[in-house]
Structures are given as structure tokens and as C-alpha cells.
Image (tube, grey):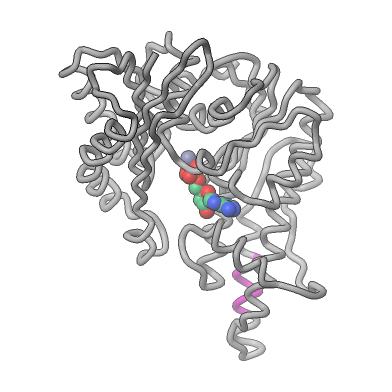
Amino acid sequence: MLILGIETSCDDTSIAVLRIEGAKPEVLSNIVSSQIQIHNTYGGVVPLLAAREHEKNLPLVLQEALQVASCKVADVDLVAVTSGPGLIMSLVKGVNFAKELAQKNNKPIIGVNHMAGHVYSNWLSTTHYPLFPALCLIVSGGHTELVLMHNHGKYELIGRTVDDASGEAFDKIARIIGLEYPGGPAISREAEKFTGEKTITLPRPMMHSKDQDFSFSGLKTAVLYLVRDIKSRLNLDLSQKIRAEIAHEAQDAIVDVLISKTKKAIEIHQPKSVLLAGGVSANKLLREKIKTLHDNVFIPPMQYTTDNAAMIAMAAYYNQDTKDFDADANWEIV
Ligand code: KG4
Ligand code: ZN
């Protein structure tokens, strides 16, 4: 079957065509039109601008996705669109576009939960599939959650952030130390420049708490005070060396907390597989460290880590009986 996926939950306009024969997926096209250049000037995503760009981009991205996949909308068996969570104005643009397309071409349509989409990026390019129960570490710009997946579409929330998400921590810390948006890749690049002994230690909030929850806002505040101290009390500018050191230590702190909590959750819940998902899964250090926690770890290929429509089409395949069209579509908490 052919599934057309549409994703517009934040600042990426993406449309994909996924072919599935005997449960084996083949991504025929996965076009992502990024708005990073536009939002970079503002240090983060501007919702009104994002919605306007989606509206402009959607017809062009559709044309390209069909062209690359060598197919027409008439060939498609199912239209799948992200229905939430995300920026409401951005979501509406994608959902309306998808509904109109499905109606005009007389195709069935389903809503897909964005976080379920990230989880299913692990089904896109693999020769063997995750076994259930699967423990998922979901790390994105808006979410940081540990979820036990009991079956397709059945999730049990084990832990979540009580304040900022891990991607949000990367983005905010990057901004404080003068790096560009999105902060995750910028901090990683900066961290790589650091050599030598570290003299700065940042906190690892809630790393040893008994629950499986996370907290990242204290880390961001610690960086804010540190930078303020360096600039005012010591009357220094952030030198290249100090900036790289802060980036290195902040990345270590975020990854340490994520890994330590995932390790504990594995001990408690004894999952048959461990899945990493969401934009922060592009982080090299996190990818390396999570591999050591379990024999059966799944990490999405780089091109499916950040927002894309192929993952939305993949989630739709396994959740075709979904009736809802709200943010919780195919996200059933057991
Ligand atoms: O999943 P995603 O593309 O969008 C949301 O659903 O939020 O995730 C975006 C987040 C941003 O916060 C970005 O800084 C982070 O993923 N990110 C990274 C890396 N690449 C993207 N964080 C750490 N290291 C990276 N290499
Ligand atoms: Zn996302």
C-alpha cells in the first residue's frame, strides 16, 4: 500500500510517500522544507510566521514528494497527517490541507500523534523490528518522556519532564551562550571544539531522584548565572574556550540525566527493546551512550530523527483503525 504522510506541527513542512509491501516499508520520498533560516533571526520559532510558511510551502512540497516518488495522489491508499501536539496554527494548516486533498481525491485520512510518529521512526529502516514491551526515550523540543510501549498504539507513561524538555534546554542554553537556533546541533558542534581538562561543573537535576521524571530548567538557570558571573563580576567576555567548555559540560549534563533515568527504567521494567526517538536523538553522544544500556537498542537513522513526514506515514500504517482526529489520536495511555 502507499501512504502519503503530512507533517506541519512546528517549523518543518514535510510530505512523504511510503510504500509498504508485506510490512516492509520503503520511503519513496520524504521532502522536508525547513524554516530554520527564517526563525533563526528571532532565536526561536515564531508561530505566526511558521503557519504562513506552511501554507506557502505545502503545495510545493506535495508536488516534489509526488515527483520524487513517481506517483500521483490517485495512487495513494491512505493520507496521514499530524493532528497534535504542536503549534496549533501550524497543525491547522497541515490538517486542513490533508483533509481537502483526501476529500478531493476520495481517499481515507487519519490523524497521527506527533510523538507516536517519532517513536515509529524506528520502524522505517530496519531489518528487524522492536519487541514489546519497548521502553521509549522520547526527547524533542517540546517533550521529554519515558514511555513503555506495550503494543502498537498502547503507551504507558513512566516519566516525564516536570519543566523544560531536553531539546528546549539545548535551545535555551545555546541562546544564553550566544549560539544559533536550533541549539542542539549548535551546542554539539561547539562542544567538539573543547579540549583539555574541564573546570566547570553544571548540575544534573533530579538525576538521583527516586521517580523517573526529569527536570532541565535548573540547568538552564545555572548556565545563565554562570555566564552573568563571567561577564559582570569577572568583567570578561565569553571567550571561545569558555563557550566551548560550557557547551561541552551542558551536553554532558543533559545526556547524563537522560541515560541515568533510562538505565533505571530498564532495571525496573525489564523491556525487550529500548527505543530512542525525537529531535534530540540526533545527538551523537546520546546515540553512543544509549547503545550500551541494552542488547536490543533502536536508534532512528539520522534523516528521521527531527520532524519528518515519513515517520507520520509509518505510525499511520500500524494504527489504521484510529478514529480520533485530535492530539491524542493513536496515543492511548494504558
Ligand atoms: O523532534 P523535533 O525535530 O521537533 C519537536 O518535535 O520539538 O526536535 C527539535 C529539537 C530541538 O530542540 C533541537 O535543538 C533538538 O531537537 N536537536 C538536537 C540535535 N538536533 C536537534 N539536540 C541535541 N543534539 C542534536 N544534534
Ligand atoms: Zn518532533
Residue at 61% x, 68% y: name it.
Answer: 190
| Residue toward you, 315 or 247 | 315
Q: Where in the figure is residue 202, as x and y percent of width and height?
A: 73, 64
Q: Classify residue 246 as left or right of residue 86.
A: right
Residue located at (41% from left, 63% from top) = 43
Q: Please determine whether, in this image, residue 331 is positioned above or below residue 226.
A: above
Asked where in the image residue 55 lies, by quadrant, the reply is top left
- Count of marks placed on residues: 0
Q: Which quadrant of the figure contains the C terminus?
A: top right
Q: Any magenta on residue 226?
A: yes
Residue nearest the observer in this picture, 28 or 206: 28
Give the left or right position of residue 118, taking residue 272 as reference. left
Single out the residue that lies furthest toward the front.
70
Extreme residue in the bottom direction: 235
In the image, what residue occupies the spot 55% across and 40% down? 278
List x then y, in percent, for residue 46.
33, 55
Q: From what the image shows, is residue 32 above or below residue 225?
A: above
* Quarter location, residue 7: top left
Image quadrant where one finds the N terminus: top left
Q: Which residues are magenta?
A: 222-228
**Picture quadrant where residue 41 is located:** bottom left
Q: Residue at x 53, y 44 (%)?
A: 279
